Image (cartoon, helix red, strand yellow):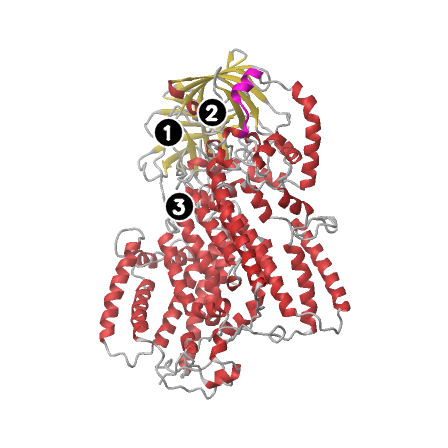
Amino acid sequence: MPYSDTTFANPQTFQQAELQTDSGWTSVEKGIFRFVFLYFLIQILPLDPQFFRNLVSFGGGYTRYLFNLSHYAPRFVGTEDSFANWGIVALVALIGSVVWSQQDDRKTNYDALFYWLRVALRYRLALGVIAYGFIKLFPLQAPLPSISNLNTAYGDHTAWKLFSLSLGVVPSYESFLGQVELVGGLLLLHRKTATIGTLILLPFLGNVFFSNLAYEGGEYVYSGLLISFGLVLFAFDAIRLFRLVSLEVAAVPNRFHPIWREQWQQYSRLALKGAFIGLTVLLYGFTTYTTYRQGSIRFPKTPGLAGAAGIYNVSEFKLAGKTLPYSKTDPVRWQDVVFEKWNTISIKSNRAVDLVNDNTEQLSATDAGRDYEYAGSQGRHYYRYTVDPTGRLLTLKNANPHYPNETLQLTYTKAGDGRIILAGVDEKRDSVYAVLDKLDKKYLIDEAAKAGRRGSLKL
Amino acid sequence: MATPNITPERADLGLITPEELSASSVSKATSRKVPADSQPGSATAWTEGQKILFRIAFVFFISMSLPNSLDWYKELVSFDWLHLHYRDLYDIARFGSGLTLFGNKLFGSTLNGYAPWIITLIFATVVGLIWTTVVRNRQIINYNLLYYWLRVVVRYRAGIGIIGFGFTKLMPTQLPYPSLGVLNTNFGDLTAQKIYWLSIGIVPWYEVFTGVVEVLAGALLFFRAYDGGVHGYSSYFVLLSGFLLIYYLKDLYNLLIRERLTIPNYFVPVFSGWQQYARIGLKTTTIGLFLVLLFWLQYVNFRYDPYKQPAQKGLKELRGNYNVTQFKLNGAELPYSPLDSLRWQQATFENWTTLTFKVNKPVELDLSNGGGAPMRDINRTFELTGVAGGQRVFYYEADTVHHVLYLQDKNRGARNQENREFLGNNRDLGGTSEGAKARLRGERRKGDKQETDNWIPKEALAIIGPEDPKINPIARSTRRTKGIEAENRPTKRNRMILSYTAQNGGQRVILQGINEKKDSIYVVLDRIQRPYALSESTLKAGSY
């Protein structure tokens, strides 16, 4: 075994220190370690059906591919992450450690096993946080709110959506969070700085975990998993640090280092490390940057009608030939209509929305899977549209999977001066006619930035 | 085959190699604890360069840690300690520091508020250099001892400050859960600042959690053993914490990066007799004041007088969201249109004494953060600051015998900054001396102004009663009494006088009377059930 020898950090100082004793592990420590070792070994194995689906899902670019791939956790029960899976892992690890303890382990080097466990955890954790770090550094995770989201009442968003929207309006802060995550992740790639990396990441991930709980997010199990990895890594140095800083007594550094006897071992170590950095830092960083430059990964890619983006008042509305006056209570009368820059039209009316509550983070390759704009937001119905070759007939399909068969077919006429006339049949095959007038809507987020906090602003 | 890792446990047992021990020349007894008789001066030798740096740092951090205005000390002795308000102690905890003697600007710029830091640094450098020339070649100062005391001062300053901030979150009063009026406002009609505040306000239990973390972090700073473990969150506390952390940096680098045996050599003075009592007394007082008493005051405040939210109860039968079914202006009915600039579109009565309604007409906005801890409900403006979208927010006083609401516009637009005039005793909006002077002016003016301003009839005023005693007696404080008095000076506001009729327990409410433009209005409101996607708060401030 190449790593079975231990050397001191500084051979010049401690050259004669060749102690031939046992490695200082008590049998209780060994027992606990066997369980910890097996438990975390299973936790970092990709025992997740979703992982293998992601492995062969190449569409949508490398950033999407690696992000989804990095985001795995062993899953045995249910379709969603739950702590029950941790229980199963613990059970398996417990059985394994009992079996292991029956074996003759006089030749087992626990220092070396602990070392290699830490190596595996370091890279697993680094992968997890770097994958998130880059999509925050280049603010893709929480994009700027869509026009529809801006024109939805605060209380019509779920807590999780509000969390994301609130982060989305301050891209510089989102970038900063990404930087913190990246610095922590990169420090993990070097053994000596790994503990400093965990010192940065643990408060960060702790905050992510509690945010997920508080804002009803769906990533609390996963962030909890990453925290548990960080804790194991930190535990290695925790006692030393506590002794030095709090008890103010002498602290002994790590003494175990693997020995690479053969040239090829050195080379393969460097090759593996180089491949990891190349794929998850350099390439992933680059593709994430280009994705960011090209647009969003959370909104549809298909462009909308040129020059139509904006919010429109519904000045006139006829249903089955009958004119309906303005109303905030009528469930069928449209109140306002938004054309996004992409092929989404959202309509506000007093018709309840069966909410889509997608609060987990998987990036979709197709427009249909990009549900960010309507997930966790009620008050408006969202339609994706296609334009026929004449450019006049729009086919609208309700994007919300709770309304699978809702289709509207509307002709689109520009009447000048920001006026659009939509006419055709709605989802109930009734004839519908709507005159839309573009509103010169000013958003306080932009206006207040111009005016400053002490400034005067009329809006 | 394998040589051992040397664990701390083995060091405890004395199992470290002789080489290691000789290399560090300490016995196992000393490795367990820094000897109590560690003599000042013997611990570390200081180079001349370090001494000069230290002198500058000493002056800088002392200036940055002590209150910079005389008013702070005046307040300290003038408090009514038997009827404290939570903000009294909070203000003590969050005093301003750094030299402002020479103003707040450097080269005409406030440098994002950092100018006092730089001015202080320049000042400290000058003083430090003078100090260096004065003491040249004389060994009169024990730098280890001075460094120790400097760190004590900084630790306590950071500890008290962080606790002060932490407590405002521990009970979620600083960032309240959004009012109905805000929930009904579009996301795009809020400022980025408001969005940030609300995003924490909607998760009160998370706010409590961050408060606990902050208070714990602050509390640990009262104990020397923990001062390396605290990271700050605002730049001021980052500065102080960073300074505390420097002390450990060398050892951490040695232990983690160089992987060397590290034996700390931290200086601790020896206390005996009265010194020990003084130390314990000081610590106990600090903890008693800023943990125990502050917690109690904060709890009472959260429960009965949450300072960002109005404290008085709104009329029970009116509370809720309403659709504006009918609206008449001077007798003429206006049909609903989202473009109409006169007609109300929707209306809301909050749990407290606020009526909100939406009109499609631009209004001058108040872009402040709605803080400043005013005592009168009418000045508690968190529900409207940084909010656009045509929302009008009126404070009402109700004559419940004759069913009349006397309403005043809570929004004063950019004029809200004038608040600083009558919000005496308040550092959020500017210097205290300014506030005090303005208060004097206000009192002088009060006599002649009040007589002309009798828009609420005496009979109704008697029914409405004074504001101060309208909260639970346990939460009343001298600060509230004085503050309400000081804020009572009439100000120019939009006013409405509307009689109200609540039918079917408030399912339908009819308002009629005179609006802010002295036009007569008649409004029929029908209550609507408006389910929000946002979960309701399970931790609510105030008692309504």
Say whether mark 1 and mark 3 are on the same chain. yes
Chain that bears disc 1: A
Residue that carries the numbered disc 2 in the rendered image: B346
Residue that carries the numbered disc 3 in the rendered image: A370
How packed mark 2 is, by other alpha carbons closer than 10 Å (few <14, some 14-19, many 20 or more), is many
Residue A41 appears left or right of B149: left
Q: Residue at x 55, y 12 (%)?
A: B330
Chain that bears disc 3: A
Magenta span includes B218: no
User: How far is mark 2 from mark 1, CA to CA?
Assistant: 17 Å
User: How far is mark 3 from mark 1, CA to CA?
Assistant: 23 Å
Q: Amino acid at mark 2?
A: Gln
* Nearer the observer, B408 or A365: B408
Mark before the other along the chain sequence, 3 or 1? 1
Instruction: Look at the image and tell me whether residue B70 can be seen.
Output: yes
As drawn, which residue projects farthest toward the top? Answer: B331
User: How far is mark 2 from mark 3, CA to CA?
Assistant: 34 Å
Q: Secondary structure at mark 2?
A: strand
| Residue B228 picture location, percent across and down | 53, 63
Considering the whole magenta stretch, tell me its main secondary structure.
helix
How packed mark 3 is, by other alpha carbons closer than 10 Å (few <14, some 14-19, many 20 or more), is some
Q: Amino acid at mark 1?
A: Arg
Q: Which quadrant: the C terminus of chain B?
A: top left
